[in-house]
Image (tube, grey):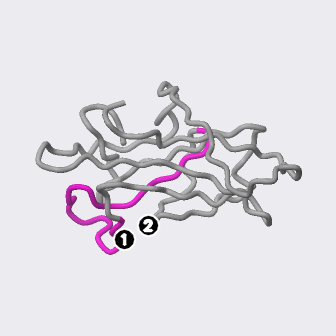
């Protein structure tokens, strides 16, 4: 990876009643062979004059259903009011994928991931930072 943190986590579909800690940082996944297999957009390349955006994820078990996903970004601004307009460096929205399938477009730092999207015992959750035209922000060929 080129100076940015993982945008992938693993979450369990099992309800772990015995877990005392209500907030868990999930283990990053580094297998990039599966990224974008089922759904992808053109790349939107971060230019040299801009600070490189980064994104990390944290999953917090929701006691009612699924997980609350915190999308922690740096050098990036969510701008829902400009979706489908011209791209602006380090601005846009995010896309959430579960097990390679896009489940949502996100316009802020929090997203509730319902249990209905978790089909396996361990599920891969991935977030991409996307430009106004829905292209994935990238550094070279590597998506952020």
Residue under label 2, please give it.
Answer: 107
Q: How many marks?
A: 2
Q: Which mark is residue 17?
A: none
Pick out the residue farthest to the bottom.
81
Q: Position of residue 140 (x, y in %)?
A: 24, 33
Disc on the earlier residue, 2 or 1? 1
**Is residue 140 a member of the stretch shown in magenta?**
no
Magenta region: 78-99
**Residue at image x 72%, y 37%?**
122
Tell me where residue 45 appears, x and y as whole percent: 22, 43
Q: Is residue 139 above or below residue 19?
A: above
Q: What x and y, as percent, mark residue 142? A: 33, 33
Residue shown at 26% from the left, 46% from the top: 52
Local crowd size for mark 2, using a 10 Å CA cut-off: few (<14), some (14–19), many (≥20): some
**Seen from this angle, which residue lies furthest left?**
49
In the picture as drawn, the residue positioned furthest to the right comes out as 18
Residue lying furthest front in this view?
Answer: 20
User: Which residue in the structure is indicated by mark 1?
Assistant: 80
Mark 2 → mark 1, Cα distance in angstroms: 6 Å
Question: Which corner quadrant holds the C terminus?
Answer: top left
Q: Does the magenta portion include 92?
A: yes
Report the quarter where the N terminus lies.
top left
Dot 1 crowding, Cα within 10 Å, few <14, some 14–19, many 20+: some
Q: Position of residue 72 (x, y in %)?
A: 45, 56
Quadrant of the rendered structure where residue 26 is? top right
Local SS, label 1: helix
Please give left or right for residue 71 compared with residue 75 in the image. Answer: right
Nearest the viewer among 136 and 14 is 14
Report helix, strand or loop for mark 2: loop
Marks 1 and 2: in contact by CB < 8 Å?
Answer: yes
Residue that appears at 70% across and 59% down: 114
The answer to which image quadrant residue 91 occupies is: bottom left
């Amino acid at each position: 990876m080129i100076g940015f943190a993982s945008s992938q986590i693993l979450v369990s579909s099992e309800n772990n009643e015995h877990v005392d800690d209500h907030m868990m940082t999930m283990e990053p996944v580094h297998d990039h062979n599966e990224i974008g297999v089922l759904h992808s957009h053109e790349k939107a390349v971060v230019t040299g004059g801009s600070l490189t955006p980064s994104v990390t994820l944290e999953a917090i078990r929701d006691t009612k259903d699924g997980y609350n996903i915190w999308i922690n970004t740096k050098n990036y601004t969510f701008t829902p009011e400009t979706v489908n307009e011209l791209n602006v460096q380090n601005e846009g929205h995010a896309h959430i994928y579960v097990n390679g399938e896009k489940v949502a477009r996100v316009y802020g730092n929090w997203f509730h991931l319902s249990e209905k999207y978790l089909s396996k015992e361990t599920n891969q959750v991935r977030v991409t930072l996307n430009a106004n035209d829905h292209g994935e922000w990238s550094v070279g060929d590597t998506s952020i």
